[in-house]
Amino acid sequence: MLRFSPYAWSKVHYLARNVPTEVSFFGVSNETDPAIVEDVVLFGQEVSKASVDADGEQMCDFIDEMFHERGLEPWRFTRIWMHTHPGSSTAPSPTDEATFRDQFGTQDWAAMLIFPKDMRGKVYCRVKIMKGAGNVPAVNYLCKCKVDYTLPFLASDEAAWAKEVAAKVVERKWANWGQGKSGYLGQPYGTYPSSYYQGASYGPPRESDLKHDMYESGSRGYYKDGKFFPWSDVARDARID
């Protein structure tokens, strides 16, 4: 079971009720218990009534902010992916399933949560646990989530949340739909080598690809000082019961 602090849960409610489109965000896990969601955080994204897109630069900025500025370990903010659906249905779409499969396939566990727009319907919550390397299939469990009022929490801050939405969420101009974007979370054409596109084999990056001090989008890992660091290395000690 995933437990939300009252602060994190009230922020989810705020985002669902006040962002008129779909919106996507990550849960921030407790330092000692990864099944406790202390906060939820937005990343830069272009949204519509039924979709969210984030390119590589936006995901790089998000990881840089969380890792360098806030000092959080990657496993605390890359495993629990959440988003809203515009109506009352929280059934995963084919795009949701592809994103959860392709972008969260290297960690030993990850979670996908989908919230209805009015926050009155059922929340979809699924945890995926990887059983091993190679072609060993993951095991998926539907699980529950709840607000835990025994956890310490901050007061809600809708003014700060509104500023975060204004800074991170841009409604898509449909005339420019699809330009420079591909997929759901950070798979832009022209940003990474061709081996990273559309589920291709993720081989070692070429030397030319490492000249930029940048992070790889999604959940496979990040670049730093010309080296590639997979999330699996820094996150393997995090466990969920």
Image (spheres, rainbow, N blue to C red):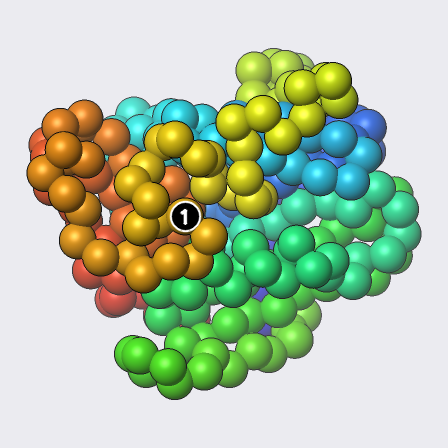
Q: Is residue 145 above or below residue 209?
A: below
**Mark 1: which secondary structure?**
loop
Circle 1 sits on which residue? 197
Residue 139, can we see it?
A: yes
How far from the left and from the top, in percent, is residue 72?
31, 40
Q: In this orientation, which residue lies closer to the viewer: 72 or 97?
A: 97
| Image quarter hosting the C terminus | bottom left
Q: In this orientation, which residue lies closer to the viewer: 64 or 54?
A: 54
> Residue 132, located in which quarter of the rendered image?
bottom left
Q: Is residue 183 above or below residue 127?
A: above
Residue 146, can we see it?
A: no
Q: In this orientation, which residue lies closer to the viewer: 80 or 181?
A: 181
Q: Indicate left or right for 222 with 156 as reference.
A: left
How far from the left and from the top, in percent, is residue 188?
46, 35
Q: Indicate left or right for 61 with 147 as reference.
A: left
Q: Residue at x 75, y 51 (%)?
A: 115
Q: Is residue 146 above or below residue 86?
A: below
Q: Residue at x 29, y 41 (%)?
A: 193
* Amino acid at pointer 1: Tyr
How far from the left and from the top, in percent, is residue 163?
61, 14
> Residue 181, located in which quarter of the rendered image?
top right
> Residue 234, located in which quarter of the rendered image?
bottom left
Q: Residues within 10 Å of mark 1 (few under 14, many from 20)?
A: some
Q: Indicate left or right for 61 with 90 as reference.
A: left
Q: Residue at x 56, y 15 (%)?
A: 167
Q: How many marks?
A: 1
How far from the left and from the top, in percent, is residue 26?
52, 44
| Image quarter hosting the N terminus | bottom right
